[in-house]
Image (tube, rainbow, N blue to C red):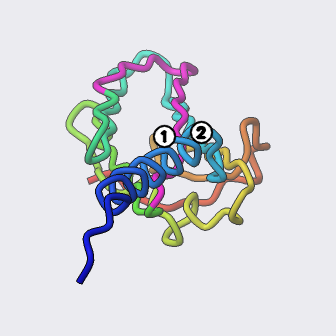
């Protein structure tokens, strides 16, 4: 077999091409942007609500909400579409924890591909509710979880 000097150049060029392609995909992501909003609809003069959310890569940390307060965070789906966010909710002696976002599962993760998603979680004394959109009306919320 004859020696081909171009073979030493072609492999590094191929690898650089793949890396460049991945950087372009990440820079101009085709994946939707998701925003999760958490609202304290708890009664006045009660314990404050603590919310702690995290994914495998990002820990959003603790957020303390007074009645009527809210916080939100946004993210893009990873390339493999395996992004999952899990949150713990703590209100005095009551608590619960569950996945608030999982692609193709649950309520928030089932939004259509390439469509931005906005999911609102409302914590009330009667339990934890969910609705799509940044400012859903009270009738849009669906009861999902009880306090434990």
Residue at the spot x=49%, y=44% of the render? Answer: 20
Kindly report the secondary structure that dominates the magenta region of the rendered protein: strand
| Viewer-nearest residue: 64 or 41 | 64
| Residue topped by disc 1 | 123
Near mark 2 (Cα within 10 A), the count class, few <14, some 14-19 or many ≥20, is some
Q: The N terminus appears in which quarter of the rendering?
A: bottom left
Residue at the spot x=50%, y=64% of the render? Answer: 103
**The residue tagged with tag 1: helix, strand or loop?**
strand
Label 1 vs label 2, nearer the camera? 2
20 vs 1, left or right, is: right
The label on residue 32 is none
Q: Which residues are magenta?
A: 61-79
Answer whether residue 54 is magenta in the image: no
| Viewer-nearest residue: 134 or 144 | 134
Near mark 1 (Cα within 10 A), the count class, few <14, some 14-19 or many ≥20, is many
10 vs 43, left or right, is: left
User: Is residue 92 shown above or below 140?
Assistant: above
| Residue topped by disc 2 | 35
Q: CA distance from mark 1 to mark 2?
A: 17 Å
């Amino acid at each position: 077999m004859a020696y081909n000097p171009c073979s030493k150049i072609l492999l590094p060029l191929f690898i650089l091409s793949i890396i460049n392609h991945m950087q372009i995909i990440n820079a101009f992501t085709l994946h939707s942007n998701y925003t999760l909003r958490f609202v304290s609809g708890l009664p006045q003069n009660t314990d404050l609500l603590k919310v702690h959310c995290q994914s495998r890569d990002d820990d959003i940390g603790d957020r303390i909400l007074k009645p009527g307060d809210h916080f939100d965070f946004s993210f893009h789906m990873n390339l493999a579409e395996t992004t999952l966010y899990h949150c713990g909710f703590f209100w005095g002696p009551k608590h619960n924890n569950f996945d608030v976002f999982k692609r193709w599962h649950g309520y928030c993760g089932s939004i259509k591909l390439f469509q931005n998603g906005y999911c609102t979680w409302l914590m009330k004394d009667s339990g934890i509710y969910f609705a799509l959109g940044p400012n859903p009306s009270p009738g849009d919320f669906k009861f999902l979880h009880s306090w434990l």
